Amino acid sequence: MSQATDLPRTRGRRPPSDELVERRRTQIIEAAYEVFSAKGYTNTGIADIAATLGMGHGTFYRYFKNKRDILDQVVDYGVERIMQALELETAKPAETLEEFREQVRRIGERLFELLDSEPGLGQVVLLEATSIDEEMTQRVMGLIDTFGALAATFLQNGVRRGFLRAELDTASVGRAISALTLPGLFAAVRGEAGEAERRRYVDAMVSLVCDGIAAA
């Protein structure tokens, strides 16, 4: 990651532009994400984040009050990474049950691949964030609800196209799918799910989701 320098002193100069402020905030968030991922939230200090960017403590405190203050932004950044991994699937709705089946499979595979490529993502968002305080726990639970709502939109498409049951409670089933996905991801984060276990888990998810709610 490229280093960031401290903002120029404002005495006798114009204050930094909004664009520069936002760029520096983004740099700090990305650095905090990397350090939290590598060392864990508890073991990370402000000095670790600042050192990653080659900046002083003072620069950090111009943007964030403390380590807990930046955590919300880091979690948002992690969730954005997850949404980027799913972007291709959200762009083109399935038109048949078979397409839907393959779509569910690809989503499961991409989530596991994302955790492989960015192991700290699951560590920060799924494990550590929920142990910080009640406010952060509720925030993560809200994010899980968001993924459930996203799943519901996939289901609504299937109902409209006629390959999923017409009476399907898409909101409730969407939340159920989100809940079913988590154990497999937790196992991957803890290093308890090898390639064969992941394949079986994805196969089971595809069968439960697709065969259980397919139109007769």
Image (cartoon, grey):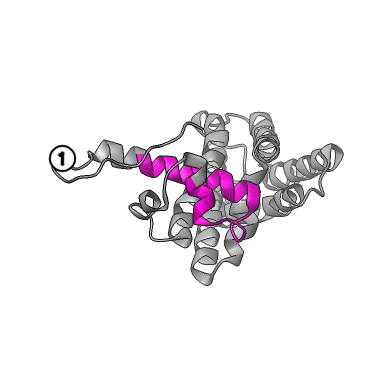
Magenta span of residues: 24-50
Task: Give the x, y percent position of residue 106.
Answer: 67, 32
Main SS of residues in magenta:
helix
Is residue 178 something one can see in this rendering? Answer: no
Residue at 53%, 31% in the rendered image: 93
Name the residue that disc number 1 marks: 14
Residue at 52%, 55% in the rendered image: 143
Amino acid at dot 1: Arg
- Check the image and name the residue furthest to the left: 12
* Frontmost residue, 6 versus 81: 6
| Crowd rating for badge 1 (residues with CA inside 10 Å; few <14, some 14–19, many 20+) | few
Task: Give the x, y percent position of residue 53.
Answer: 47, 40
Q: Is residue 9 above or below residue 134?
A: above
In this image, 201 relative to 143: left or right?
Answer: right
Tell me the quarter of the image containing the C terminus.
top right
Task: Give the x, y percent position of residue 197.
Answer: 84, 43
Residue at 74%, 45% in the rendered image: 205
In this image, 78 relative to 99: left or right?
Answer: left
- Check the image and name the residue furthest to the right: 196
